[in-house]
């Protein structure tokens, strides 16, 4: 059984986080325990982009951004996967540099040192050379960079369906089973 921690940073793209939380809630048979770390900027961006505070309404544990007395701050917490969605370039830079100044960057450091799965759903355009090098560093350390670049071959019709083209891919990367559009399948 998976133990997943979801981190939400202040990058634009709260819809990706919202859809992931909704889907994890529905996958309780595969993910009996999942937790969330959310920056204050992430809460502000969520409220701006989505017009609500629904991040308070999910069936999960919520860890405070600066509380290092949580299971995700230690390898003994045995979280299998960390998904940072959306992942700001500042957060990615701190992770790539080994700077653990908050619980998001500390949990990512723990996931990498324990050789577990870190998925960074980066949300920025265009990339500069620093972004690209930080993505390379995280990839070389074992992390997965999954840009929030939606696909359109499934003919998504709503913003949620567009976001799901990324979220379903992230769920696949996390090793979970979900019914989703599959190229070449009916």
Image (cartoon, helix red, strand yellow):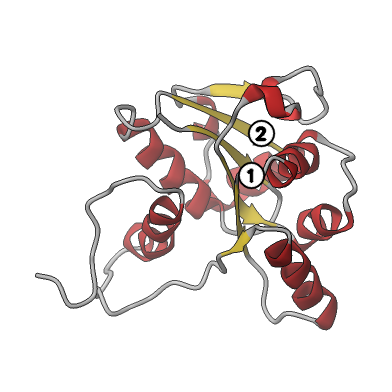
On-image quarter of the N terminus: top left
Q: Horizontally, is 29 left or right of 9 in the view?
A: left
Q: Residue at x 61, y 44 (%)?
A: 116
Quadrant assignment, res 124: bottom right
User: Disc 1 or 2, which lies upstream in sequence?
Assistant: 1
Residue found farthest to the top: 69
Q: Position of residue 132 (x, y in %)?
A: 75, 77
Look at the picture and state if 138 lies above or below 106: below
Q: Horizontally, is 49 left or right of 76 in the view?
A: left
> Cα distance, mark 1 to mark 2?
6 Å
Q: Secondary structure at mark 1?
A: strand
Look at the picture and state if 64 lies above or below 89: above
Q: Residue at x 40, y 23 (%)?
A: 32
- Check residue 37 in the rendering and tell me which mark sits there, or answer none: 2
Q: Position of residue 13 (x, y in %)?
A: 57, 58
Query: CB under 8 Å between callouts 1 and 2?
Result: yes
Quadrant assignment, res 166: bottom left
On-image quarter of the C terminus: bottom left
Q: Position of residue 93 (x, y in %)?
A: 83, 60
User: Which is nearer the eye, 171 or 19?
Assistant: 171
Estimate how packed mark 2 is, as few (under 14), some (14 to 19) or many (20 or more) residues with alpha carbons within 10 Å: many
Q: Position of residue 114 (x, y in %)?
A: 69, 40
The residue that label 1 is drawn on is 8
Q: Residue at x 33, y 78 (%)?
A: 152
Q: Secondary structure at mark 2?
A: strand
């Amino acid at each position: 059984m998976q133990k997943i921690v979801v981190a939400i940073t202040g990058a634009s793209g709260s819809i990706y986080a919202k859809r992931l939380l909704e889907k994890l809630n529905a996958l309780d048979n595969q993910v009996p325990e999942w937790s969330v770390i959310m920056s204050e900027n992430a809460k502000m961006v969520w409220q701006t982009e989505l017009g609500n505070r629904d991040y308070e309404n999910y069936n999960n544990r919520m860890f405070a951004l600066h509380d290092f007395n949580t299971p995700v701050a230690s390898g003994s917490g045995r979280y299998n996967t960390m998904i940072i969605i959306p992942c700001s370039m500042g957060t990615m830079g701190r992770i790539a540099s080994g700077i653990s100044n908050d619980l998001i960057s500390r949990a990512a450091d723990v996931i990498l040192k324990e050789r577990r799965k870190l998925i960074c759903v980066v949300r920025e355009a265009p990339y500069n050379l620093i972004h690209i090098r930080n993505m390379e560093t995280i990839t070389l350390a074992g992390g997965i960079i999954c840009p929030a670049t939606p696909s359109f071959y499934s003919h998504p019709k709503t913003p949620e369906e567009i976001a799901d083209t990324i979220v379903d891919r992230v769920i696949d990367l996390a090793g979970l089973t979900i019914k989703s559009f599959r190229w070449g399948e009916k």
